[in-house]
């Protein structure tokens, strides 16, 4: 048998490996790239040169948001949110204390772990992202708007079970290469905005899909009623609870609206139709549907401006705030119907919502009228 040179065998194996088809090579390289970057997960130098794809940035940010790891998130945040004068050399958020948010007549300062990121995170993202269920997140769609703008639709489940869809908007630092420092960041993807899809947007998308599959349905109102929860559910967001109550009150269904209430103690000063003021502080020790229904019915039937909620023509959600991660204040603008006894076209309310430990659902604890002073 002739002597076989080992070097010749190795070269032959090397050339044979290079005959693999291109899709297999790209697939292998893609796996190797992910594994290699995962080994250096916290090394910012690997990401500051624009080597990451925007899809990978979203996945990494989901991990950091779940842990509320702000130092690791800093490399994906806009420069205006980062404090360069950090004493320990690590980037810090420039906004140490979140600003006061005006909800109704009250100024609220949020205390959540992501409150300082309010310029790029809406209230839904600040509520859902901390501690979210990472393995249940799903990418619904991606869109490359331009060479420097990227958008991705991601379904995220909160730790409490709330299910929401978020729109991630990322931008590439291509046009910020005026200084030596920014030249090193050219091509790096950063978060420009993360916002939750509203119930109206989700309903419109679902209606379009239904119409494409089965043609025209019975009507928009019928579809809207089917999409909103009729009873408290852990997967429902606090915004969905407000929409469900508003839709029930618009139809005059006080019983359905009362199912989302947990009014333990309610102190209200309201104006009756004859101009007199009355105050009450009913204490509800029985949390069955009966007392909640009776209390809501009495308030809606004789008190101003609560009567504007019944049979209103439309409603719009205004600003909102999270005093804690388990409580929320939502401002609501209600447009009265034509011929209403309530004076004024728009009436403003503040919904007080709380994540109840008894059933794990977002519930309405109080509805306060916003009176201009």
Image: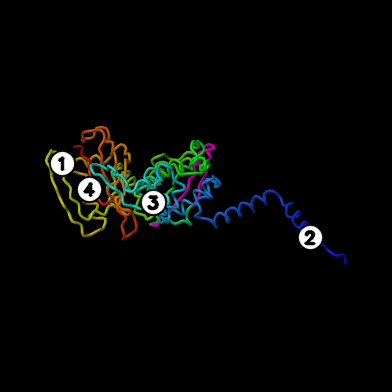
Is 92 part of what is drawn in magenta?
A: no
**Residue shown at 24%/44% (left/top)?**
106
Q: Earlier in the sequence, mark 4 or mark 1?
A: 1
Picture disc at residue 9 = 2
Q: What is the distance, in whole Å, between disc 4 and disc 3 at their CAs?
A: 59 Å
Q: Earlier in the sequence, mark 2 or mark 3?
A: 2
**Category of crowding for the residue at label 1, using alpha-carbon neighbours closer than 10 angstroms: few (below 14), some (14–19), many (at least 20):** some
Q: Which residues are magenta?
A: 138-159
Q: Earlier in the sequence, mark 2 or mark 1?
A: 2
Q: What is the distance, in whole Å, between disc 3 and disc 1 at their CAs?
A: 57 Å
Picture disc at residue 297 = 4
Tag 1 residue:
271
Residue 345 at x, y percent in the picture: 25, 33
Closer to the camera in the image, 256 or 320: 320
Residue 233 at x, y percent in the picture: 36, 55
**Category of crowding for the residue at label 2, using alpha-carbon neighbours closer than 10 angstroms: few (below 14), some (14–19), many (at least 20):** few
Closer to the camera in the image, 232 or 62: 62
Is 154 part of what is drawn in magenta?
A: yes
Q: Earlier in the sequence, mark 4 or mark 3?
A: 3
Up the image or down, 121 lies above or below 290; here it is above
Left or right position of 205 against 305: right
Q: Earlier in the sequence, mark 4 or mark 2?
A: 2
Up the image or down, 342 lies above or below 22; here it is above
Closer to the camera in the image, 327 or 107: 107
Q: Nearer the viewer, mark 3 or mark 1?
A: 3
């Amino acid at each position: 048998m002739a002597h076989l040179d080992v070097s010749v065998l190795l070269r032959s194996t090397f050339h044979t490996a290079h005959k693999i088809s291109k899709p297999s090579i790209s697939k292998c390289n893609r796996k190797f790239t992910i594994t290699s970057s995962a080994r250096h997960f916290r090394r910012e130098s690997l990401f500051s040169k624009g080597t990451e794809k925007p899809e990978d940035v979203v996945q990494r940010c989901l991990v950091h948001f779940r842990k509320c790891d702000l130092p690791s998130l800093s490399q994906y945040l806009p420069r205006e949110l980062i404090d360069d004068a950090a004493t320990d050399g690590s980037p810090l958020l420039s906004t140490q204390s979140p600003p006061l948010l005006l909800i109704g007549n009250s100024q609220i300062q949020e205390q959540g772990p992501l409150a300082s990121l309010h310029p790029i995170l809406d209230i839904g993202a600040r509520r859902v992202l901390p501690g979210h269920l990472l393995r249940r997140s799903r990418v619904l769609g991606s869109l490359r708007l331009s060479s420097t703008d990227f958008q991705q639709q991601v379904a995220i489940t909160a730790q409490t079970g709330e299910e929401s869809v978020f729109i991630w908007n990322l931008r590439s630092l291509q046009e910020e290469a005026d200084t030596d420092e920014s030249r090193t960041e050219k091509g790096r993807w950063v978060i420009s905005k993360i916002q939750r899809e509203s119930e109206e947007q989700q309903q419109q998308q679902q209606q379009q899909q239904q119409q494409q599959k089965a043609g025209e349905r019975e009507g928009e109102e019928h579809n809207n009623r089917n999409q909103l929860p009729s009873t408290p559910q852990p997967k429902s967001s606090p915004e969905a609870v407000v929409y469900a109550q508003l839709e029930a009150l618009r139809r005059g269904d006080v019983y359905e609206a009362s199912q989302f209430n947990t009014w333990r103690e309610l102190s209200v000063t309201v104006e009756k139709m004859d101009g007199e003021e009355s105050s009450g502080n009913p204490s509800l020790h029985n949390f069955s549907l009966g007392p909640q229904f009776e209390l809501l019915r009495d308030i809606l039937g004789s008190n101003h401006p609560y009567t504007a909620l019944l049979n209103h023509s439309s409603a719009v959600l205004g600003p909102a705030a999270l005093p804690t991660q388990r409580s929320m204040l939502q401002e609501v603008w209600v447009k009265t119907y034509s011929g209403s006894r309530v004076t004024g076209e728009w009436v403003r309310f503040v919904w007080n919502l709380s994540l109840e430990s008894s059933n794990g659902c977002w519930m309405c604890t109080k509805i306060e009228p916003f009176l201009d002073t």
